[in-house]
Amino acid sequence: MNTSSPIDARRAEVVRALSRVLPAHALLARSEDTIPYECDGLTAYRNRALAVALPETEQQVAAVLQACHALGVPVVARGAGTGLSGGAMPHSEGVTLSLAKFNRIVRIDPLSCTALVQAGVRNLAISEAAAPHGLYYAPDPSSQIACTIGGNIAENSGGVHCLKYGLTLHNVLQVRGFTVEGEPVSFGSQALDSPGLDLLPLVVGSEGMLAVVTEVMVKLVPKPQLARCIMASFADIEAAGEAVAAVIAAGIIPAGLELMDKRMTAAVEDFVHAGYDLDAAAILLCESDGTPEEVGEEIERMSAVLRAAGATRIEVSRDEAQRQKFWSGRKNAFPASGRISPDYMCMDSTIPRKRLAEILRAIEAMEQQYGLRCANVFHAGDGNLHPLILFDANDPDQLHRCELFGADILETSVRLGGTVTGEHGVGVEKLNSMCVQFSPEEREQMFALKRAFDPNEGLNPGKVIPTLQRCAEYGKLTVLRGLLPFPDLPRF
């Protein structure tokens, strides 16, 4: 008598199909082998795929997609797993397609200031390879030592220098990959313009829902002759928020403009000893880069603006080592938070710059409401927030309160004129909050776009776009919280 479960039978069927197109070492199906892939950086949510495929060539990627398409098996593409919204969480009836072995830098072209790289190449590795030519890749998410360019494409990642140099979208020329059916597809162009409709902006930030990316051409920029960083202290968060707006209003676009509150400053100072002001309610890191003359002038102008906005202390990096030290604290905000709490959930929303103080004060009130601490670090220059809610995932009640806290931050951001995500994506984490920001008609347009690329929803299904039913149910739950109740949506 056959005692295997339907899921075991399905797994066996999928493994047989993939075994015909992949070598044995490139296919994982045993429980102990697939467990490491059950989540991304959002560890509160986990799932187990039927199998994990690790192709080594584009032909194998195409073959895996074709086999899965023929069987009606969902596919979730995965990079380094550093994402923070559950975008790479596996589908329980699907295959995880890892691009980890696509880690080759095909070429660096110093004349055109471009790099052609495979999707599994680490973000920082691009700059390291370009350094001998005096070039680097500008987007620098905090996870750049580990995150891959394919994952950056999926989430449209930014980093501390995104204010001046832009997000991933602004630094990518062309993307190659495969459709859900395993057909080759290309977006963008090496030229200044691409023929036909420019679909590259659709793919960048689409969270693996439209195509599987295998190769990317990125822009490189000249390494500045000099960079210096200001550390400015403020006695209250309102003054820090006003200082951010004042810098931009003065016509200055810093290379970086970051804000950390007192709790975050204390956590990172204990971790990296960057020399931060522990008495300040908030500190700003403001960087200038360019020629020595440009930097000198801009540092002087920014310092004057910051003093006028109420800075209680201003310190300018005296050399490259101290500049790197200033930024090491900001770059290590996440691991530093891990030292003061068993777990943390990093939120990601965007608000108008002028409302930074409002959201910080709102978060302070939420700490009391939900009984949890929150450490705040922001890409202040473009209003991208990264509050880190501190909790213990082993306590189901704390996890529940953390989820409510996170949703409140996202939806408060929307009410302040912002959005529920900036650079971490929607994934599974922000599905409910998408119901608050977007109308049923807007969400249907998103589904229509998804169907144009992937009619049967075979790529990363269940992510990013909430269903009508989900939003209806979420509307019922949020009536008492004063959020949108969705009274006109039909119930199923």
Image: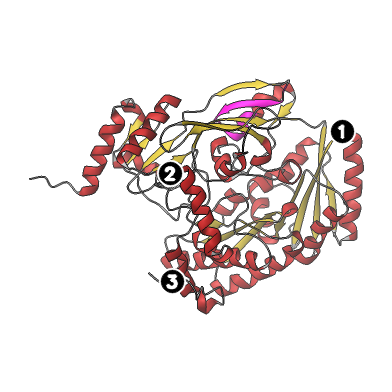
Q: Which portion, as a residue range, is magenta?
A: 112-126
Q: Nearer the viewer, mark 3 or mark 2?
A: 3
Q: Which residue is mark 2?
A: 459
Query: Crowding near pointer 1: few (<14 within 10 Å), some, many (20+)?
Result: few
Q: Earlier in the sequence, mark 1 or mark 3?
A: 1
Q: For the residues marked 2 and 1, what is the alpha-carbon distance in whole angstroms?
A: 46 Å
The first of marks 3 and 2 along the sequence is 2
Q: Position of residue 24 (x, y in %)?
A: 31, 27
296 left or right of 488? Answer: right
Q: Nearer the viewer, mark 1 or mark 3?
A: 3
Number of residues whose C-alpha sits closer than 10 Å to that of mark 2, classed few (under 14), some (14–19) or many (20 or more)? many
Per the image, label 3 sits on a secondary structure element best described as loop
Q: Quadrant of residue 65?
A: top left
What is the C-alpha distance between the residues marked 1 and 3? 60 Å
Residue 141 falls in image quadrant: top right
* Nearer-the-camera pick, 215 or 161: 215
Residue at disc 1, secondary structure: loop
- In screen coordinates, is 36 left or right of 187? left
- Residue at numbered disc 3: 490
Q: Which mark is residue 291?
A: 1
Residue type of the residue flagged with mark 3? Pro
Placement of the C terminus among the 4 image quadrants: bottom left
Is label 2 or label 1 in front? 2
Please state which of residues 370 and 440 is positioned toward the viewer in this rendering: 440
Task: Indicate left or right for 60 with 144 as reference.
Answer: left
> Mark 3 and mark 2: span between their CA atoms?
28 Å
Q: Quadrant of the N terminus?
A: top left
Examine the structure image and report whether residue 476 is included in the region drawn in magenta. Answer: no
Give the camera-side residue of 198 and 7. 198
Res. 261 image quadrant: bottom right
